[in-house]
Amino acid sequence: MESVDTLGHWQAHLHPLFDRLRAAATPQAVMDAVGQATLDIVGPGLLTINAWDVPTREIRRLWSSDPAAYPVGGKKVKGDTAWTRQLLERGEVFVGEGDTALAAVFDDIATIRNLGLNGVVNVPLCHGGTVIGTFNYLAAVETWTAEDLTALRMLAQWVAGAVREATGG
């Protein structure tokens, strides 16, 4: 994947994002704006934005760049795994590179493979130190760059409030 390493590249996409966020009146509008900016800045891939319900251990998809493969409203119950402890309990970014890494953590690996994706960055969305959701970007990438990770972590922060509002938090 081509690196997002120039300020000019970011600025070309961030200024329109800022304008869209200023006008956004709903959580959906915020997620639409950030979703488009993510694909523009980081490149082609799959982005999903999910809410996390701690008591039920359920992830619920609120937004998807590919609703045919990953429809909004889709739900999964997450068991106790190294991935859930890292991302959903400790609130740490998960970076997966290569088919083996993805197969170890995702039960929908067949769908991921069919989309030609082999890398993932899962960013926890937090409020008050508690994980309330996830910002998940998958792409056909062998290795994530520091610039990619920075861009994804930054973009994710703009949807945390929208996820909180969408879930009545």
Image (cartoon, grey):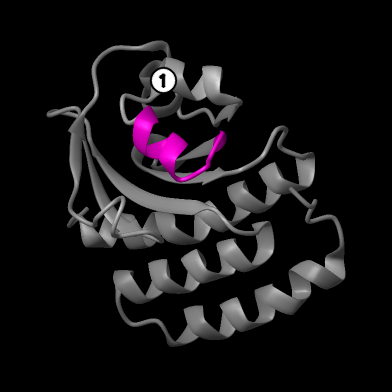
Image spot of residue 24 (x, y percent): 40, 82
Residue drawn 77% across the image and 47% down it:
147
Answer left or right for 58 relative to 67.
left
Q: Is residue 86 visible?
A: no
Quarter occupied by residue 16: bottom right
Q: Is residue 131 above or below residue 60?
A: above
Answer left or right for 107 relative to 96.
left
| Towards the viewer: 118 or 12 | 118
| Towards the viewer: 156 or 99 | 99
Chain part drawn in magenta: 109-120
Q: Is residue 110 visible?
A: yes
| Residue 7 painted magenta | no
Residue drawn 47% across the image and 74% down it:
33
**Mark 1, residue position:** 105
| Residue 112 painted magenta | yes
Q: Amino acid at mark 1?
A: Val
